[in-house]
Image (cartoon, grey):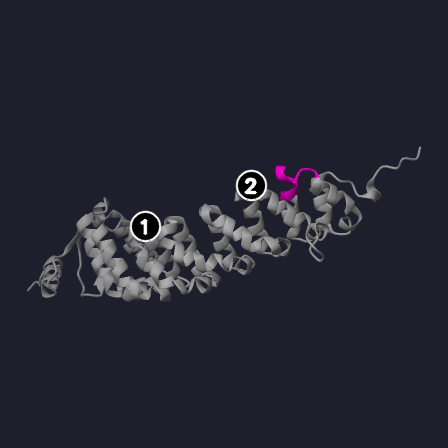
């Protein structure tokens, strides 16, 4: 006697769990069939526990999310919600959660964010989870991400210094206006003179200079006295260059003066002789606000600069020829 057909078995399993079998259309005839329902933690042969670390399983679910219609995608999101935190923290699962956030309808997206919200702080320190939290900031309406900001208020400096937290702050700076994020950013700007020289926090300061005009003056005022020190720092030099790029015209002379009149061991010539400072001085020499003062100072320090490979580069940029290379006046 023949047993029940595969389809009948599939329907029976679905009925036992109270779910209708899910139709999934991909456009490829071989897959134009009902997906098997194998229990609350399984879907089309993929277990939630496997998706997190299995590239094959995660790619399957990514493809299904993209090809599904609204109803099918909503069912997939509901299924993912059962293990959303482990998925968000896992190597492959974080990609699935990000895709779900991108493609889900507003109500499903809200459900995903609500389930993740208690774990925002846990996610920002996670090598995989920080990408999910950044995606939350990117896809949610700016008026709806106050919950993310609230989790970080009082911890702005610590988050800025974190290797993954700085990425989340960058996304917040890009997607929120200053009235929303102001309290958090005030914490960071108050420490910008130190943060500009930090391995990770410098990216947050650069982002503020570029995307938040109202904070540029505060950052410059905080850094101005120590600008030559920042100029010779591996990380701070990038912030100084960003200030030269984006500061208002009426503040650029302040930048020129601070670098031109720096005290030893951070005089202009000493900064120009430094690996990182040389790039700052080259950009400074090209600023219209600098006039001829920078080039003249470089020429006066020609002998000292010629002793450094970085100083030689600055001399070349400024069109100054070291004395030993000048053509002889003798016949």
Residue at the image point whose x is 70% and y is 55% from the top = 263
Q: Within 10 angstroms of label 1, few (less than 14), some, or many (20 or more) residues?
A: some
Residue at the image point whose x is 61% and y is 43% from the top = 253
Q: Nearer the viewer, residue 94 or 176?
A: 176
Horizontal side of residue 132 vs 221, given as left or right: left
Disc 1 to disc 2: CB gap under 8 Å: no
Coordinates of residue 216 in the picture (x, y in percent): 50, 48
Label 1 SS:
helix
Splitting the image into 4 quarters, where does residue 113 fall? bottom left
Seen as rendered, the residue at the extreme left is 1
Label placed on residue 250: 2
Q: Which residues are magenta?
A: 283-292
Splitting the image into 4 quarters, where does residue 4 fall? bottom left
Q: Nearer the viewer, residue 135 or 156?
A: 156
Label placed on residue 142: 1
Label 2 SS:
helix
Q: Which of the two discs, 1 and 2, sits closer to the camera?
A: 2
Q: Quadrant of the N terminus?
A: bottom left
Q: How many badges with numbers are in the image?
A: 2
């Amino acid at each position: 006697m023949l047993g029940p057909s595969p389809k009948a078995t599939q329907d029976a399993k679905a009925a036992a769990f109270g779910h209708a079998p899910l139709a999934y259309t991909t456009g490829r005839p071989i897959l134009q069939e009902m997906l098997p329902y194998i229990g609350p933690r399984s879907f089309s042969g993929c277990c939630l526990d496997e998706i997190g670390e299995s590239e094959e399983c995660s790619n399957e679910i990514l493809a299904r999310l993209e090809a599904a219609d609204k109803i099918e995608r909503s069912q997939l999101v509901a299924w993912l919600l059962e293990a959303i935190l482990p998925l968000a923290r896992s190597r492959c699962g974080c990609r699935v959660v990000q895709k779900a956030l991108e493609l889900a309808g507003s109500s499903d997206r809200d459900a995903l964010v609500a389930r993740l919200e208690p774990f925002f702080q846990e996610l920002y320190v996670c090598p995989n989870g920080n990408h999910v939290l950044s995606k939350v900031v990117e896809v949610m309406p700016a008026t709806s991400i106050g919950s993310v900001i609230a989790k970080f208020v009082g911890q702005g400096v610590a988050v800025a210094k974190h290797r993954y937290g700085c990425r989340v702050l960058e996304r917040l700076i890009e997607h929120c206006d200053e009235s929303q994020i102001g309290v958090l950013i005030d914490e960071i700007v108050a420490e910008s003179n130190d943060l500009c020289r930090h391995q990770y926090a410098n990216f947050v300061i650069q982002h503020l200079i570029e995307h938040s005009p109202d904070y540029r003056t505060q950052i410059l005022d905080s850094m101005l006295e120590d600008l030559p020190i920042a100029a010779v720092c591996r990380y701070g030099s990038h912030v100084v260059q960003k200030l030269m790029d984006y500061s208002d015209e009426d503040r650029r002379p302040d930048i020129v003066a601070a670098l031109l009149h720096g005290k030893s061991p951070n005089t202009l010539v000493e900064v120009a002789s430094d690996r990182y400072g040389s790039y700052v001085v080259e950009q400074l020499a090209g600023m219209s606000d600098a006039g001829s003062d920078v080039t003249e100072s470089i020429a006066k320090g020609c002998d000292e600069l010629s002793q450094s490979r970085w100083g030689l580069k600055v001399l070349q940029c400024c069109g100054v020829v070291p004395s030993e290379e000048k053509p002889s006046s003798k016949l």
